[in-house]
């Protein structure tokens, strides 16, 4: 399921920050390297505690989209710095963001993140990817059931 969220995030990452997206792509730096840690810890491991508490409040109010919007906001805030780094330095930087990160700097970047692509909003893109995933799982189950039936017929 997280792979579908990563795919949805990448859609909006490319839309919002094309230069940085291409830079990450050139190093094969995928969202699973940094985003999973951000999401699973609700940013508490990478952001200063007071700032992560503000992110939690907004997440409780706005839902899961805010977590992904926050990721885009962080990337936007540090875009100029990240464009100067290589793979190792980017991965290290995104694991523990600067202690001087503040809501005054981060929240305008979060607010500027556009969560719409080809007239589809975050919820529509993620739902579409989840639906595709369910259809694939169902097809795989049907295939497995047919394989089991065929094996049973042979025995």
Image (cartoon, rainbow, N blue to C red):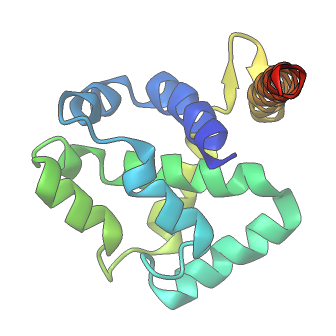
Q: Quadrant of the C terminus?
A: top right
The picture places residue 119, in percent across and down from the top left corner, at: 76, 13
Residue at (66, 57) in percent of width and height: 67
Residue at (65, 83) in percent of width and height: 53
Where 137 falls versus 100 (above or below)? above
Asked whether residue 129 appears in the rendered view, the answer is yes
Residue 22 left/right relative to 148: left
Which image quarter: residue 54?
Answer: bottom right
**Residue placed farthest to the front in the image?**
155
Which image quarter: residue 12?
Answer: top right
Where 6 falls versus 90 (above or below)? above
Q: For this rendering, which residue is in front, 141 or 82?
A: 141
Residue at (39, 74) in percent of width and height: 101
Q: For this rendering, which residue is in front, 148 or 118?
A: 148
Residue 8 left/right relative to 140: left
Q: How many marks?
A: 0
């Amino acid at each position: 399921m997280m792979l579908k969220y990563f795919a949805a995030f990448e859609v909006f990452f490319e839309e919002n920050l094309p230069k940085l997206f291409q830079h990450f792509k050139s190093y094969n730096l995928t969202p699973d390297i940094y985003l999973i840690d951000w999401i699973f810890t609700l940013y508490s491991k990478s952001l200063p505690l007071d700032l992560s508490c503000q992110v939690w409040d907004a997440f409780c109010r706005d839902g899961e989209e805010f977590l992904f919007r926050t990721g885009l906001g962080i990337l936007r805030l540090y875009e100029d710095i990240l464009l100067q780094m290589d793979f190792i330095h980017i991965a290290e930087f995104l694991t523990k963001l600067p202690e001087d990160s503040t809501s005054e700097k981060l929240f305008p970047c979060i607010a500027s993140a556009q969560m719409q692509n080809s007239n589809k909003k975050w919820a529509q893109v993620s739902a579409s990817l989840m639906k595709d995933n369910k259809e694939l799982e169902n097809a795989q189950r049907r295939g497995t059931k047919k394989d089991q039936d065929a094996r049973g017929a042979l025995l």
